[in-house]
Image (cartoon, rainbow, N blue to C red):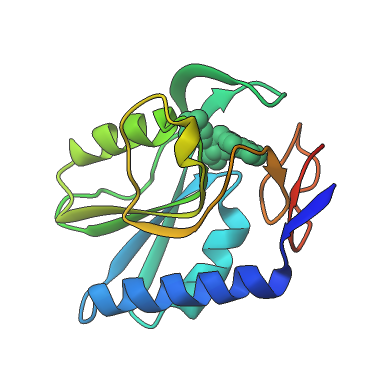
Amino acid sequence: MKLLLSEKEIQGKVSALARKISRDFSDREVLLVGVLKGAFIFMADLARKMTVPVKMDFVRLASYGSGTQSSGKVRFTKDLETPLKGKDVVVVEDIIDTGITLKYLCRCLKARQPRSLKVVTLLDKPKRRKVNFAADYIGCKIDDHFVVGYGLDCAEEYRNLRGVYILK
Ligand code: IMP
Ligand code: MG
């Protein structure tokens, strides 16, 4: 494994994202919607660095098997417990790859009529897109590598690493 982002670099990026989002939503309450499982560590750090009131909920979507290849299909395996109508919603994702997961999720969530819907992702692999999708807040754009750590897994391993590593 090769280090791509150190713990310090990640925390710098998370702080910058929290500042930006807090500024954009000043005087508002934000509902953070974490995409399980990968986003749980990022969301925990992001939420604690934000300076506006936040509430949190989670969805779980299945789009990947146990390996490193996308199946191209998405389904909810756990839905939100919070109604979205009239809320300022920020979806929190670990990484955007083909874009299929978030495109599907955002279409579903928009239909619930939130006041606003934005997406923050720690990592983005723009070269891998199969569908047209862009996040509103991006921590770091990376090349086409499979990465693990800081919530990201390969077959459920490595989520607890403090940095992000390229899996070779
Ligand atoms: P997409 O639908 O192809 O954009 O896939 C998004 C999901 O695939 C992410 O939420 C991750 O859970 C997973 N994923 C994509 N790339 C990686 C990676 O490099 N490492 C670990 N998981 C990844
Ligand atoms: Mg994910």
* Figure quarter occupied by ligand 2: top right
Quadrant where the C terminus is found in the figure = top right
The residue closer to the viewer here, 121 or 54, is 121
Question: Where does residue 75 sit, x and y in percent of width and height?
Answer: 44, 23
What residue lies at 33% left-to-right and 44% top-to-bottom?
Answer: 134
Do we see residue 125 in this rendering? yes
The reply, left or right, for residue 145 in relation to residue 12 is right
Residue located at (29% from left, 38% from top) = 106
Judge whether 17 appears above or below 85 on screen: below
x and y, in percent, of residue 8 in the image? 69, 75
Residue 61 makes an appearance in the image = no
Q: For residue 54, which quarter of the picture? A: bottom left
Q: Nearer the viewer, residue 82 or 110?
A: 110
How far across and down, in percent of the image, does residue 57 sit?
Answer: 43, 53
User: 125 or 67: nearer the eye?
Assistant: 125
In the rendered view, does 151 fall on the left or right side of 34? Answer: right
* 41 lies above or below 129: below
Q: Which residue corresponds to the image point at 33% horizontal and 33% vertical from the top-left?
A: 103
- Which residue occupies 61% across, 73% down? 11
